[in-house]
Amino acid sequence: MTTARLFVAGATGYTGRHLVEIARARDLEVVAHVRPDSARLDHWRARFEGMGATVDASPWTAEAITAALATHGPTHVFGLLGTTRARAGQGLGSAVPETYEAVDYGLTAMLIDAAALLTPQPRFVYLSAAGVSPHARNAYLAARARVEAKLAASGLTHVIARPGLITGDDRDEARTGERVGAVVMQGLSALGKVAGFGRALHRRYATMTGAQLAAGLLTCTLRSDGDGPEGRGRVLTLEAGTLHDAA
Ligand SMILES: NC(=O)c1ccc[n+]([C@@H]2O[C@H](COP(=O)([O-])OP(=O)(O)OC[C@H]3O[C@@H](n4cnc5c(N)ncnc54)[C@H](OP(=O)(O)O)[C@@H]3O)[C@@H](O)[C@H]2O)c1
């Protein structure tokens, strides 16, 4: 069996950094992608290389990302990218505009196209979000629905995870709104369970830390490597703190 070699786009994010760490602890080969215009490129390079990962700082252009994947030949490509409404308002001056269209859809679509060109093709793992459906109206969910549709049409074997809120004390951004939301959702979720009507609510909105999500994602992904053609696409949702195949 081929040794797993992971290419992680969004490695500097809350989920991504845990994924790199957990995968390295399991002795898997990891290429951590860090955007070249990152203000903390040196920090991330030192941190990831210290774990034994390779750092790739190719720019986000179709040519460069395609070349990077061809160079590394990953068995698994993780798309863990996304911007936030707060970032959009900050005008961070990155090479890619901080919009859901440009980052959440555009960069992930670029990654899918690059992965689909590889031979053999890697398994693609996409971190989507709870609530994503083709009928979603809000811009965040709609961008993610389009990524899911593109992935399904790509021919790539893939895993899509739709967790609820990802939060924890070890986030470096304050994200006050998100934390308040997490507490409220946890309360609602528990209430729903007790009342017996909230199983779906609980499944959709229970919270997870970045480490829990990364570990679950990695385990589910590696476990599904033995799937036949019927395992071409898997969708995972959250229940009682762990990822499960969607009903
Ligand atoms: N947080 C939640 O509750 C939640 C719930 C469900 C799904 N999700 C989705 O899951 C994904 C990962 O979540 P997370 O909380 O781990 O995200 P995160 O900590 O915000 O990390 C986002 C990643 O995307 C990268 N990124 C953002 N803007 C970029 C740009 N303009 N150009 C290039 N890279 C850019 C960041 O790179 P830099 O570090 O260089 O900025 C970082 O690596 C996101 O797509 C998110 O929408 C999140």
Image: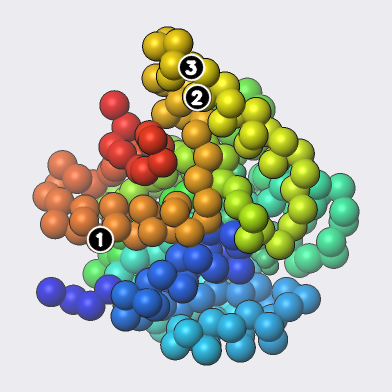
Label 3, residues with CA under 10 Å away: few <14, some 14-19, many ≥20: some
Q: Amino acid at mark 3?
A: Gly
**First in sequence: mark 1 or mark 2?**
2
Answer left or right for 188 relative to 133: right
- Position of the N terminus, as image quadrant, is bottom left
Determine which residue is flagged by label 1: 222
Could you tell me if the residues under marks 3 and 2 are in contact, i.e. CB atoms within 8 Å?
Answer: yes
Q: Amino acid at mark 1?
A: Leu
Label 2, residues with CA under 10 Å away: few <14, some 14-19, many ≥20: some
Q: Residue furthest right?
A: 90
Label 1, residues with CA under 10 Å away: few <14, some 14-19, many ≥20: few
* Marks 1/2: CA–CA distance: 31 Å
Determine which residue is flagged by label 2: 190
Question: Helix, strand or loop at disc 3?
Answer: helix
Question: Helix, strand or loop at disc 1?
Answer: helix
**Residue 60: image location, x then y, percent:** 62, 68
**Residue 165: image location, x then y, percent:** 57, 40
**Residue 71: image location, x then y, percent:** 41, 83
Q: Measured along the vertical axis of the image, is residue 36 above or below residue 116? A: below
**First in sequence: mark 1 or mark 3?**
3
Q: Residue at x 54, y 82 (%)?
A: 48
**Residue 32: image location, x then y, percent:** 51, 76
Choose between 151 and 39: the one closer to the eye: 39
Q: Measured along the vertical axis of the image, is residue 107 above or below residue 207? A: below
Determine which residue is flagged by label 3: 192
Choose between 31 and 185: the one closer to the eye: 185
Q: Nearer the viewer, mark 1 or mark 3?
A: 3
Asked if residue 81 shows in the view, the reply is no
Choose between 20 and 150: the one closer to the eye: 20
Answer left or right for 52 relative to 140: left
* Marks 3/2: CA–CA distance: 5 Å
Colouring of the image: rainbow
